[in-house]
């Protein structure tokens, strides 16, 4: 069952931390060496255990003991509880929902030790009714994900016992819906925009790309059929899990009003010449998940491997969707899946591919979607609609990316808003689109905008806020929004920030980082120039020094000093960076920042 995979993964993560976890860059470097992961067989065997809720005539497979933290709760029985007991259960559910940022999983018929006791039909129905009563007091919805018979005994008194897995969802009081961002990657002409169009518009494609037209932004995109920019669209789900898209609603605002969970698809370019735009979109928008699209007819070609490497480097959970099933011969499709599975199991990836064929597979994959190991694989057709029901159910079950404690911690920090879009609208003025990385931003808040060309920051005031094309008054950490400012400033660029004055932001030209060179045809020396991606920042930087080495080459790790070539930026220690020039590729983390020394970094 899903919960088994999820908790085994959590136990493994805790164990790893206790003995000292290696840097993620070391694991990603394995893409380019012959290393192996000794845990692969363990994870494959866990997946082969199957679903503990499914029928098994000879034995019951138990779950791990109930976790003390997190959004998972075991309940043996909820039959005719007293009012005092109901109040206690409601408080407990409220805490589990808070831990899951609005979502909780209840296992009914399971003891605290994980033993699958099972309940009779009467007791199970009564327990589910009680769970519904608890949820209604919190304004939450209840969805039975699956209900399975144990069938483990010939004793008539214990026959027909079953256990159930239930999803409880409540939109947090300070949000309109539970928000997720899903970046869509894949090679050119694999059907990324078409699939997003089918999901968001509710209409199947005609086989000639009709569904993708809503995703295009420029004339040349309509002419060539290729995405060259970053575009967005949304897909909602109501409290019962039903799709809310443009087939049921006419505007984005109407979709937002009628859904309890909202997914934003970030459609990124697949052609190699737009790779810088793709990398910038992936680093700027901080997606919770990546949906990697692979054509069933052509397989793993072009930029597919490179996009997979980006997801691994940024440590974003990902799943794979194989498209064009309707025009792919069975043997070719089988070869594509086999090639994908081989690549995912190989050195550097060390993943466990999980083919999705049934709704039970979807539920299992949904709970394991944050796993560092499991990679669900879907096979769909945007023309016939085959497999889309499993994909949409999976999207509905995707858990939020942040935990409650992490979210609360980020909201208590001073405001920092990263800018990745700039506009100048008539009668409105300067409008900035971006992501609030920390803090809580409200209307009329006074902030600092910068860094400017000289490294200073200019005071501004937020006049109005919009999210999903509708007005709002508050934006919280992890949410994207568009902000209208009270003044117009020249030369506002992507990569700037809006910051609380208490943050005391300082610009920098020089920074030190620990990097891993993934590929370079020769040696990198002092003076080497490359394009650096740090969040929404994209700028050429010069290699000013290599610590304790004269040069570095492929697979080398080193501490280096970079200098921004054009203008200063605001960056933080610990931030992840990607650098790329031609075939040269590398990743790293910023270890030290050297602020610019000027009389005043804030314009009065």
Image: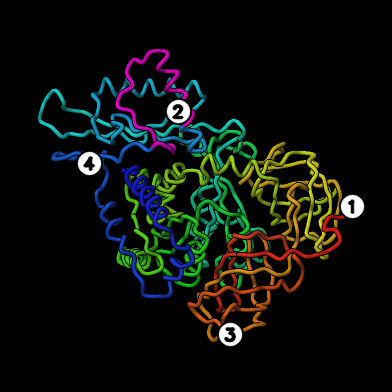
Number of numbered discs overlaid on the protein picture: 4
- Residue linked to disc 4: 61
In the drawing, what numbered circle is on residue 604? Answer: 1
Q: Find residue 138 and report its horizontal and vertical position in percent.
A: 51, 24
- Between disc 4 and disc 3, the foreground one is 3
Residue found 55% across the figure and 72% down from its top? 586
CA neighbours of label 1 inside 10 A, class few (<14), some (14 to 19), many (20+): few
Q: Could you say which is closer to the camera, residue 458 or residue 549? A: 549
Q: Which residues are magenta?
A: 68-95
Question: Which residue is disc 2 drawn over?
Answer: 93
Residue 551: in sight, yes or no? yes
Residue 10 within the segment the image draws in magenta: no
Tell me if residue 211 comes above or below residue 167 in the rendering.
below
Q: Earlier in the sequence, mark 1 or mark 4?
A: 4
The N terminus lies in quadrant:
top left
Alpha-carbon span between mark 1 and mark 4: 67 Å
Q: Nearer the viewer, residue 97 or 224?
A: 97
- How many other residues sit within 10 Å of disc 3, few (<14), some (14-19) or many (≥20)? few
Query: Is label 3 in a helix, a strand or a loop?
Result: loop
State the separation of the CA atoms marked 1 and 3.
Answer: 45 Å
Q: Quadrant of residue 74?
A: top left
Q: Earlier in the sequence, mark 1 or mark 3?
A: 3
């Amino acid at each position: 069952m899903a919960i088994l995979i999820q908790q085994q993964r959590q136990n493994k993560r805790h164990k790893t931390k206790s003995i000292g976890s290696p840097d993620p860059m070391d694991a990603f470097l394995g893409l380019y060496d012959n290393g192996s992961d000794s845990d692969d067989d363990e994870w494959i065997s866990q997946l082969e255990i199957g679903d503990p809720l499914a029928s098994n005539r000879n034995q019951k497979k138990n779950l791990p003991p109930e976790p003390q933290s997190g959004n998972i709760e075991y309940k043996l029985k909820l039959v005719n509880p007293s009012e005092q007991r109901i109040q206690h259960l409601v408080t407990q559910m409220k805490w589990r929902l808070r831990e899951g940022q609005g979502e909780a999983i209840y296992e009914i018929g399971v003891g605290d030790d994980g033993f699958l006791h099972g309940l009779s039909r009467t007791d199970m129905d009564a327990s589910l009714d009680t769970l519904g009563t608890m949820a209604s007091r919190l304004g939450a919805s209840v969805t039975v994900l699956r209900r399975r018979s144990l069938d483990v005994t010939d004793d008539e008194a214990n026959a027909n016992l079953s256990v159930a897995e239930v999803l409880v969802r409540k939109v947090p009081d300070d949000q309109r819906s539970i928000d997720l961002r899903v970046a869509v990657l894949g090679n050119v002409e694999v059907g990324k925009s078409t699939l997003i169009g089918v999901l968001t518009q509710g209409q199947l494609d005609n086989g000639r790309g009709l569904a993708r037209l809503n995703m295009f932004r420029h004339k040349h995109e309509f002419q060539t059929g290729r995405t060259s920019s970053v575009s967005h669209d949304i897909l909602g789900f109501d409290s019962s899990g039903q799709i809310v898209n443009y087939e049921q609603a006419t505007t984005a605002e109407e979709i937002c009003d009628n859904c309890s969970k909202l997914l934003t698809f970030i459609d990124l370019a697949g052609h190699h010449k737009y790779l810088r735009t793709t990398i910038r979109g992936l680093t700027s928008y901080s997606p919770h998940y990546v949906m990697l699209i692979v054509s069933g007819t052509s397989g793993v070609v072009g930029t597919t491997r490179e996009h997979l490497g980006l997801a691994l480097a940024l440590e974003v959970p990902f799943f794979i969707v194989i498209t064009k099933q309707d025009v792919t011969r069975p043997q070719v499709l089988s070869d594509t899946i086999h090639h994908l599975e081989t690549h995912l199991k190989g050195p550097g990836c060390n993943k466990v591919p999980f083919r999705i064929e049934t709704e039970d597979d979807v539920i299992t994959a949904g709970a394991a979607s944050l796993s560092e190991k499991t990679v669900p694989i879907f096979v769909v057709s945007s023309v016939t609609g085959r497999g889309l029901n499993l994909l949409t159910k999976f999207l509905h079950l995707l858990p939020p990316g942040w935990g409650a404690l992490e979210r609360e911690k980020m909201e208590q920090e001073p405001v920092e808003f990263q800018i990745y879009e700039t506009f100048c609208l008539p009668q409105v003025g300067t409008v900035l689109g971006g992501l609030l990385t920390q803090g809580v931003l409200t209307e009329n808040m006074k902030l600092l905008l910068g860094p400017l060309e000289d490294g200073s920051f200019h005071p501004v005031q937020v006049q109005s806020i919009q999210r999903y094309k509708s007005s709002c008054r508050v934006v919280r950490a992890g949410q994207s929004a568009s902000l209208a400012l009270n003044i117009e400033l020249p030369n506002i660029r992507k990569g700037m920030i809006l910051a609380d004055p208490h943050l005391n932001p300082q610009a920098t030209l020089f920074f030190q980082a620990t990097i891993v060179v993934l590929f370079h045809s020769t040696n990198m020396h002092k003076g080497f120039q490359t394009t650096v991606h740090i969040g929404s920042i994209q700028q050429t930087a010069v290699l000013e020094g290599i610590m304790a080495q004269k040069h570095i080459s492929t697979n080398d790790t080193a501490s280096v000093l970079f200098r921004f070539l054009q203008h200063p930026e605001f960056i933080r220690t610990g931030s992840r960076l990607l650098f790329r020039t031609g075939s040269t590729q590398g990743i790293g983390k910023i270890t030290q920042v050297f602020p610019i020394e000027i009389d005043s970094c804030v314009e009065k």
